[in-house]
Amino acid sequence: MDNKREFFHLRSELCKALSHPKRQEILVTLREEELTVSELVEKSRIPRPNLSQHLALLKSRGVILVRRKGHKSYYRLSDQRILQAYDMISEILLESLSSQKTVVKKAIGTRT
């Protein structure tokens, strides 16, 4: 049972890392290519100090990897399956919102 709890804890920590809107934006920005911090700041418009904190957390959870070349650090996703999971969650959210919209439309329609 302790192994299950440890697994649940680790999974929870990963999900927390992915749950912040700014970190989601970083993941989407890194979808196609690895980027430097300067490029991430430019593309995401997240201030550098704030971006650095988010990158450090994503790195500590194993979500992104860093490659150093000279004075530059290049960030990339550690595993493309992270985006597959992100995309699946987005699809579920869109379907859920669509269902809720239908319920509201029906409720309003029955009152008039």
Image: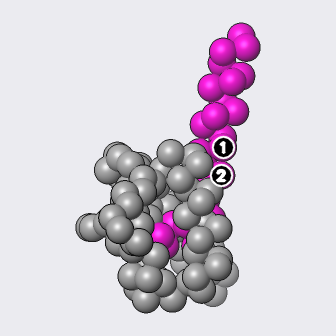
Residue type, numbered disc 1: Glu
The answer to the question of whether label 1 and label 2 lie on touching residues, with beta carbons closer than 8 A, is yes
Residue holding disc 1 = 13
Report helix, strand or loop for mark 1.
helix
Q: Label for residue 46?
A: none
| Residue type at numbered disc 2 | Lys
* 9 over 55 or under it: above or below: above
Residue drawn at x 50%, y 45% is: 62
Residue in view at x 64 percent, y 68 percent = 53
The secondary structure making up most of the magenta span is helix
Is 21 colored magenta in this rendering?
yes
**Residue beneath the point at 38% across and 61% down:** 68
User: Residue 40: x and y, percent?
Assistant: 43, 79
Q: Quadrant of the N terminus?
A: top right
- Magenta stretch? 1-26
Q: Disc 1 to disc 2, how far (Cα)?
A: 5 Å
Q: Position of residue 16 (x, y in %)?
A: 65, 52
Numbered tag placed on residue 16 in the rendering: 2
Camera sees residue 52: yes
